[in-house]
Image: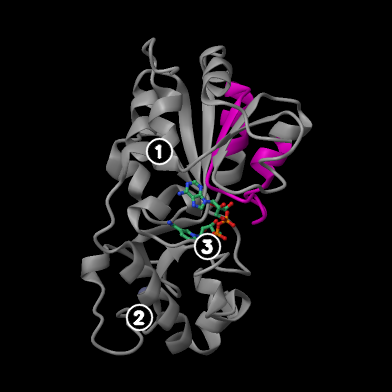
Amino acid sequence: MTAVPLAEARRVFLGAPRWLALTGAGMSVESGIPPFRGPGGLWERMNPEEYAHVRTLERDPARAWELFRILEAAIAGARPHAGHVALAEAERRGRLNGVTTQNIDGLHQAAGSRHVIELHGTLRRWVCHRCGLAMAPEDVDRRGPVPLCGCGGVIRPAITLFGELLPPGALEHSLELLEAAGRLLVVGTSAEVHPAATVPHLALERGMPIIAVGPDPTPLLESRGVAWLRGTAREVLPRLLEESEGADA
Ligand code: NAD
Ligand code: ZN
C-alpha cells in the first residue's frame, strides 16, 4: 500500500471526534534523540538483550549503568518539537483522549500533554532496585560507577528493562483509552516491541480507523486499513492536526 496525501489523512482525522495517539522512538528523533533500531541506532553498538536486561542490572550493574549514562546523555537538553506541541494542543481541544508512548524521555509532558501513559516508564525518575525508594535525577549520587541507595541497593531509572513487566496498569489503561476513542493515531513506531505493539494490533484487528505517521515503509504503516501519512513527526503532525480550513493545501 502506498502513502495517502495529507488532505486525505486530514479528512480521516477531522471526520472522527476523538483519537488516541501512540508514539514511539521516531517521535523524538527530531528532538535529537536517536532511535534504538536502524542505521545509527544504539543497538548497532550494544546488544539490547545484554545491556538492557534486568539480569545485567542484577549481576553486573556497572554494565547496565553504561547504558543508563548513554540514555541520559541522549535526552539531556532535548526539547519537544512542533509535533509534540501539536499533539498537546489536539488534546486540549478534546480531539485526543491521551498519548500512550513507548518513549522514556518525558517530551510529551514537556510539550504540555496531560494524559500521558508511559508504557516503558521514564528516565525522569529514578528508583532503588531493592527498596523501591523513588528520587529525582538530580538527587542520584553519581560519584561511583554504580550509584547506590542508603539501603545498599542499586539505583536505576524507572524504565522497563527486558525481563521486566510494564508499569502496572499501563497497557490496560492504554487499551481502555483505545476502546473509548475507537481510532488510533500512530507516530514513529515500528510496532515491533511487545507488549506495546498490542495497542496498534488490537486497533487493526478491530478494524478501527488508523492514521500512521512515519518516513519509512514498515509492515504496520503499510497494513491494509491504515492511512499512512508519509513524513516526519515534526513536519506532518502540525499540518495533520491543524483544525482551520486552508491547512489542506
Ligand atoms: P521503533 O522500532 O519503534 O522505531 C522507530 C520508528 O520511527 C521507525 O519505524 C522509523 O521509521 C520511525 N521514524 C524515524 N524517524 C522518524 C521521524 N522523524 N518521525 C516519525 N517517525 C520516525 O523504535 P526503537 O528505536 O526500536 O525503540 C524501541 C523502544 O526503545 C521504545 O519502545 C522505547 O522504549 C525505547 N526508546 C525510547 C526513546 C525515547 O524515549 N526517545 C528513544 C529510543 C528508544
Ligand atoms: Zn534502597
Question: Mark 3 — residue?
Answer: 160
Which quadrant holds residue 211?
A: top right
Q: Toward the viewer: 73 or 97?
A: 73
Q: Toward the viewer: 143 or 106?
A: 106
Please name the amino acid that badge 1 sits on.
Glu
Q: Residue at x 51, y 56 (%)?
A: 120
Q: Earlier in the sequence, mark 3 or mark 2?
A: 2
Q: CA distance from mark 3 to mark 1?
A: 30 Å
Q: CA distance from mark 3 to mark 2?
A: 22 Å
Question: Do labels 3 and 2 touch, CB within 8 Å?
Answer: no
Q: Is residue 179 magenta?
A: yes
Q: Toward the viewer: 247 or 101?
A: 247
Question: Mark 1 — residue?
Answer: 235
Question: Do labels 3 and 1 touch, CB within 8 Å?
Answer: no
Q: Is mark 1 within 8 Å of ligand 1?
A: yes
Please name the amino acid that badge 2 sits on.
Cys
Region in magenta: 174-202
- State which image quarter holds ligand 2: bottom left
Q: Is mark 3 within 8 Å of ligand 1?
A: yes
User: Is residue 39 found left or right of 88 in the rendered image?
Assistant: right
Q: Earlier in the sequence, mark 1 or mark 2?
A: 2
Please state the horizontal and vertical placement of residue 231, each as a whole percent of the image: 50, 40
Tell me the crowding category of disc 3: few under 14, some 14 to 19, or many 20 or more residues within 10 angstroms, Cα based.
many
Compared with 61, 16 (above or below) is: above
The disc label shown at residue 151, or none: 2
